[in-house]
Image: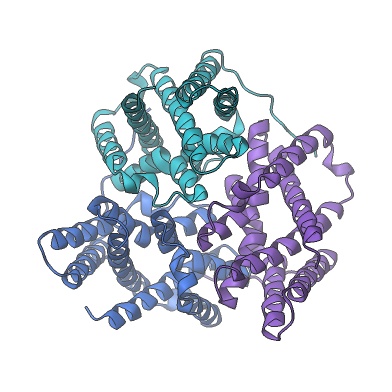
Chain colours: A blue, B cyan, C purple
Amino acid sequence: MDTSLLYLIDLFGTAVFAISGVLLAGRLRMDPFGVIVLAGVTAIGGGTMRDIALGATPVFWIRNTTYLWDILITSVLTMLIVRKPKRIAWWILPVCDAIGLAVFVGIGVDKSLAYQDSSFVAIIMGVLTGCGGGIIRDMLAREIPMVLRSEVYATACIIGGLFHTLALYLGYSSSVALLSCISATLIIRLGAIRWHLSLPIFALNR
Amino acid sequence: MDTSLLYLIDLFGTAVFAISGVLLAGRLRMDPFGVIVLAGVTAIGGGTMRDIALGATPVFWIRNTTYLWDILITSVLTMLIVRKPKRIAWWILPVCDAIGLAVFVGIGVDKSLAYQDSSFVAIIMGVLTGCGGGIIRDMLAREIPMVLRSEVYATACIIGGLFHTLALYLGYSSSVALLSCISATLIIRLGAIRWHLSLPIFALNR
Amino acid sequence: MDTSLLYLIDLFGTAVFAISGVLLAGRLRMDPFGVIVLAGVTAIGGGTMRDIALGATPVFWIRNTTYLWDILITSVLTMLIVRKPKRIAWWILPVCDAIGLAVFVGIGVDKSLAYQDSSFVAIIMGVLTGCGGGIIRDMLAREIPMVLRSEVYATACIIGGLFHTLALYLGYSSSVALLSCISATLIIRLGAIRWHLSLPIFALNR
């Protein structure tokens, strides 16, 4: 996969995740600074935790501040434009989010394999990159993280990570592995959105 | 203390902490992935924060993935087996938890002294290793961390850490210091469970 | 600015932030250990996140434990002395907090510029150092972080950071830049307290 294309999709995913933070903030009656913080945390929280756990510091957005400008501009524009979220077709955000998610997982697996060898750890880092920001966003907003409760969200990331590491294990190039990870995550996630797939819930009787 | 015995108890403590995460998740109606995340966060959250603060990155479970397999297998088995937590004798989990806690505190103090010299910091790292995972678990589950509210839990860790550093200060070997830390933490915690000991609560009249 | 004076104000800010943690804990009926944890998190949480993101580990309070003693002594004294917070004049805590905040922002910007070059990142690190502890404190206490919701709090930090980096850009010495940052943050924050300034809230109609 072309590196510059991947980078562009990464910036697109960052922007989409930032928008999801802005929209949540809009329901919580935050001031503009709070909105931007929530947008930023959603967009770069996962990658930040990945880099910190790997010891890849300073974290990625300190090395390349384009991500910060991306978030700032996206957030300000979203605040200026969006007044009636109902007018947006319901499927636009989830589909963009799925694209961002898929790219984040692929980048997370890829980057972690540059720092250590374990496929297990690489898959965890992919999931963390994809889901971590949303988890912090929900914790800040005092909600039990949606990711942990339902829908095939994190599961899509895990399967994407499995495709990635399996492809590498079978000898495919890192571009092919990355592409298979992104495709698998995206397809599963889009299917889950389309058909409202959820895993069965684990509940204990007390 | 025999290193391999300590390692085995460490893996046992990790498993027990994972089970406590699974049981909490079962009350929150999470999907299986959410359950495993909550189990993992409880089991390795404290040690992860310790390693990150010390700069001991990549963190311990990236260097040795046995901890991850331990958590994964324990969580899946717990989900398959446990249906009626009421049938488990009430004291089994707290006692196992106390064993895990005591070992985690000892390991936390021990490891931090390999990275810096202060006994004060070492005790904090012991408490963080023992209590940190439970604190993140409760935050994810949207509860005020139990550790901070009552029972002689963190207090047992602090006293264990004091024993550890005092023994080293008095010239005992690191094995003896570790053993005294684990014993002190365990005995105090078991006593607190048996006699329902709590510290007096600090409350302000307003 | 005299380094030793800055260090003293830093310790003063740490103590004031610790007191704000103790007072919140007093409303939540925590045990003394929980109180000290909440105090510590409030006082050093922001700087800790800054150091971790920058890769400046071990974090500052591991390198210099004076901060820890500062928090411990302040927290214990506050628990012993304060019984009726109503008797304290209402403006004393916010004004002390503003002083601590201003110094923390200046130190955060200053320290981050020793590790990387971007002014954008430096301002974020200033805001993180000033506001991060309060955000973790509120998350532990299960409240939506106050900082994100209203009052010109983080905004004061951002403007302070802008003054700091602008002064450096214009060729002033780092002492002058630091002083302008601290002054700007302090004046804006005191003004916001005095006249109850808030930014307009961003709210979405659904």
Pinpoint residue A105: horizontal percent, then vertical percent.
Answer: 30, 64
Pinpoint residue B194: horizontal percent, then vertical percent.
Answer: 52, 13
C77 up-or-down from C102: above or below: above
B60 up-or-down from B83: above or below: below
Left or right of residue B19, residue B127 in this image = right
Q: Quadrant of residue B61?
A: top left
Extreme residue toward the bottom, this view: C170
B52 up-or-down from A169: above or below: above
> Looking at the rendering, in which quadrant would you find the C terminus of chain B?
top right
C148 up-or-down from C163: above or below: above
Extreme residue toward the front, this view: B171
Residue B196 at least partly seen: yes
Residue at position x 45%, y 49% in the image: B56
> Looking at the rendering, in which quadrant would you find the N terminus of chain B?
top left
Residue at position x 69%, y 40% in the image: C25
Q: Quadrant of residue B2?
A: top left
Q: How many marks?
A: 0
Residue at position x 75%, y 56% in the image: C10
Pinpoint residue B46: horizontal percent, then vertical percent.
Answer: 47, 41
Residue A89 at least partly seen: no
Left or right of residue C153, residue C49 in this image = left
Q: Quadrant of residue B157?
A: top right
Pinpoint residue A42: horizontal percent, then vertical percent.
Answer: 46, 64
Left or right of residue C116, residue C82 in this image = right
